[in-house]
């Protein structure tokens, strides 16, 4: 049996702000020593009948529980379950589906999520339909198609489409269909999917939550106890658990999430404005800019614009690569959300596994570049991009 998570934090300070929630643990398991940072519980198993109710690390560990407590607190929800990666968290949710079930998916999802649905879950009879959830027809198709689940990402990777979560969740709720929102790009500090009506809020904690590009993790948050039981079951039954060490790192990382994100978002907004006026840049996508196609929705459901900026340049693959490689402060790499700026060519990196036709349809072209803006000084980042974009003159 998995014991209830402590509500120590809530008891001591009923309404702490997010910056406080990110730093203080509900549980520390350190009563005897007074240790400020929790130890790493590097153990595979636990003596039977221990007061914490621990059993075997695949089905729970103090470091999981500490991180789960902080994540639930920051998300302002009842339950969080941690996994070994964002992909493990996706797998955990998909494992609740049955053969023949239909999942109505936003057509622009992270490439490996698409690959999981099309190349793995499809083999087990899970059907998917891909729709553009920014269109009213897609929202009304929920009632007509009666899917077993709706799967969204907002903002999407890499196009930064913003889906009206309140509207989609209401349409799904009307026919009792659960909605999953991948909230990796926004984080709970910027957007709270559960409060907008989602059933499950999924995050790759590898990204902003950890923030230092040195661990992988995933989490699913929910207020629904039935879904929580399913997530705990998937964690242990499918072996999707993280390592205690990675949980410890992510617990340390999340403490500075509010600080990091503030700097990253200020940098991203400044870069987006600069690039929008740049002669070598065709277009800029940033959710809180007025020219974003779903700007009004972004202003309503996101408290800030996030720290990813996507741009379109007039370039073929080789030229786009040359720009990415000419940068000093942006490393050309997969992933995002760390304190260091990264640059990515989605067509050949994060979305390499998506078919050419689909990429063309969605607009993931060779001239599309995604920036994960870090905590460096904004003027250094601007100067760096300027010198690299000169290659396109
Ligand atoms: N969801 C989104 C939006 C992502 O961008 C990623 C990874 O880039 C994932 C999920 C998968 O996370 P992980 O790499 O931790 O498995």
Image: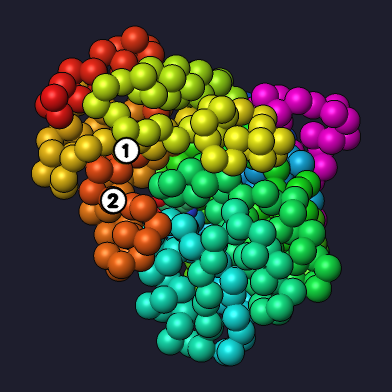
Q: Position of residue 364 (x, y in %)?
A: 33, 52
- Residue 174 falls in which quadrant of the image? bottom right
Span highlighted in magenta in the image: 1-28
Where is mark 2, residue-wise? 365
Q: Residues within 10 Å of mark 1 (few under 14, many from 20)?
A: many
How far apart marks 2 and 1 lie (CA) works out to 8 Å
Where is mark 1, residue-wise? 312
Q: Nearer the viewer, residue 390 or 81?
A: 390
Whether the residues at callouts 2 and 1 have beta carbons within 8 Å, the answer is: yes
Q: Of the two numbered discs 2 and 1 on the same chain, state the one appearing first in sequence.
A: 1
> Residue 69 shows which numbered tag?
none
Tell me which residue sits at (29%, 29%) in the image: 281
Q: Nearer the viewer, residue 262 or 364?
A: 364
Tell me which residue sits at (76%, 25%) in the image: 17
Is any part of residue 365 visible from this angle? Answer: yes
Q: Nearer the viewer, residue 286 or 109?
A: 286
Label 2 sits on a secondary structure element that is: loop
């Amino acid at each position: 049996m998995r014991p209830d998570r402590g509500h120590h934090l809530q008891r001591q300070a009923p309404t702490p702000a997010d910056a406080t929630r990110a730093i203080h643990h509900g549980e520390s398991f350190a009563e005897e020593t007074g240790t400020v940072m929790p130890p790493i519980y590097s153990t595979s198993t636990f003596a039977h009948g221990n007061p914490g109710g621990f059993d075997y690390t695949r089905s729970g560990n103090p470091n999981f529980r500490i991180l789960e407590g902080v994540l639930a607190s920051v998300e302002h929800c009842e339950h969080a379950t941690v996994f070994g990666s964002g992909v493990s968290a996706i797998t955990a949710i998909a494992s609740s589906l049955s053969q023949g079930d239909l999942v109505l998916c936003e057509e622009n999802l992270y490439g490996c999520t698409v690959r999981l649905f099309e190349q793995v879950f499809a083999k087990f009879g899970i059907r998917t339909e891909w729709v553009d959830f920014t269109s009213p027809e897609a929202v009304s198709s929920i009632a007509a198609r009666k899917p077993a689940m709706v799967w969204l990402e907002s903002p999407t990777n890499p196009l930064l489409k913003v889906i009206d979560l309140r509207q989609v969740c209401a349409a799904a709720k009307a026919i009792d269909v659960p909605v999953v929102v991948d909230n990796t790009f926004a984080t709970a500090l910027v957007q709270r999917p559960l409060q907008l009506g989602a059933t499950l809020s999924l995050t790759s904690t590898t990204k902003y939550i950890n923030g230092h590009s040195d661990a992988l993790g995933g989490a699913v948050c929910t207020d629904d106890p039935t879904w929580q039981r399913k997530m705990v079951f998937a964690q242990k039954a499918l072996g999707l658990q993280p390592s205690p060490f990675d949980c410890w790192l992510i617990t340390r990382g999340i403490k500075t999430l509010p600080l990091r994100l503030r700097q990253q978002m200020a940098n991203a907004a400044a870069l987006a404005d600069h690039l929008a006026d740049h002669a070598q840049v065709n277009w800029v996508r940033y959710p809180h800019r007025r020219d974003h196609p779903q700007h009004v929705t972004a202003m309503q459901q996101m408290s800030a614009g996030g720290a990813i900026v996507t741009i379109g340049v007039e370039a073929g693959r080789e030229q786009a690569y040359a720009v990415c490689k000419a940068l000093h402060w942006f490393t050309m790499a997969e992933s995002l959300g760390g304190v260091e700026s990264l640059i990515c060519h989605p067509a050949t990196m994060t979305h390499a596994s998506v078919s050419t036709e689909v990429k063309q349809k969605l607009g993931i072209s060779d001239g599309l570049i995604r920036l994960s803006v870090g905590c460096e000084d904004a003027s250094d980042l601007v100067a760096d991009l300027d010198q690299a974009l000169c290659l396109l003159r």
